[in-house]
Amino acid sequence: MKQVGKILIIIMLCAAVWFAWQQYQDAKSAYAPLDQGQIEEVYDIHNLPEYSGNPAVEINGGRPDFASEDLQAKFFEKLSPLDDLGRCGAAEACLDRWHMPEGERGEIETIHPSGWHTATYDFIDNEGYLFNRCHLIGWQLTGRNADRRNLITGTRYMNVEGMLPYENEVAWYLRRTRNHVRYRVTPVFQGKELVARGVQIEARSVEDGGKELSLNVFCYNVQPGVEIDYLTGENKLAEELASPKEN
């Protein structure tokens, strides 16, 4: 009987280890970055190549440009005021897991960022909508939602293929380590254009000096198959084969 008891204990321990491992894998898959393949590298934000098929390019070897005095392990969030054209500026934060939201995100449909147009194309997911209201600091990181200073007009492609993988990478690090992450997202506009050409995302883990998390990328605000007028937000099907449905 004693031998049977020992065997049962071993089986229970193995089951507990297996269950814990499954929970770890589930969390990892939920927050780990998507596989984007090899991305091109450029030196700085002023030397960006034209979009060539990858949703993002790496800047300065992935090294963010934070001053040493900015790398303090203390939560904060700071959004820039809108400029005279109603455009967002840089959004900065020092993130931690204790300020990450739980539950469902609220509605943001009442916000119309600069250059906003409602247009649909049948080859885009999410009911075909070309533009999303893209959070600069993702909702999953701080819970900030319907704030005009934190939402820009961004393509579905930039939102999901460009920005989301990096937001997931940061969220996964925060939940896994309980450390802080210095974070900055900067929309890049040209001249008086109302729609950003893309966003620069910079992040660095604080307590480990960027050993586990260090990134500096530019995500293109494009949608394959669609031509966008960045000055106004107007858009059309590439090669002018058809017109979008505009509401």
Image (spheres, grey):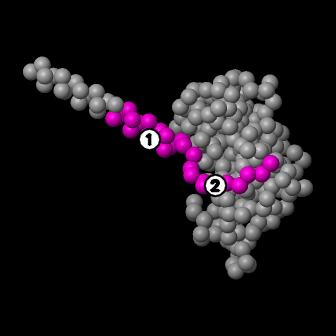
Q: Against 162, is 82 above or below?
A: above
Q: Is the N terminus in the top left, top right, bottom left or bottom right quadrant?
A: top left
Which residue does the numbered mark 1 point to in the structure image? 26
Q: Amino acid at mark 2?
A: Gln
Q: Return the residue found at the far bottom.
A: 241
Q: From the viewer's perspective, tell me whether residue 175 is left or right of residue 202.
A: left
Residue nearest the viewer, comparing 205 with 220: 205
Instruction: Tell me what residue is drawn at x 70 percent, y 23 percent.
Output: 74
Which label's residue is closer to the chain start, 1 or 2? 1
Which residue does the numbered mark 2 point to in the structure image? 38
Mark sitting on residue 89: none
Q: Amino acid at mark 1?
A: Asp
User: CA gap, disc 1 to disc 2?
Assistant: 25 Å
Residue nearest the viewer, comparing 207 with 157: 207
Based on the picture, tell me whether residue 190 belongs to the magenta stretch. Answer: no
Magenta residues?
A: 18-43
Q: Against 167, is 156 above or below?
A: below
Give coordinates of residue 42: x percent, y percent: 77, 51
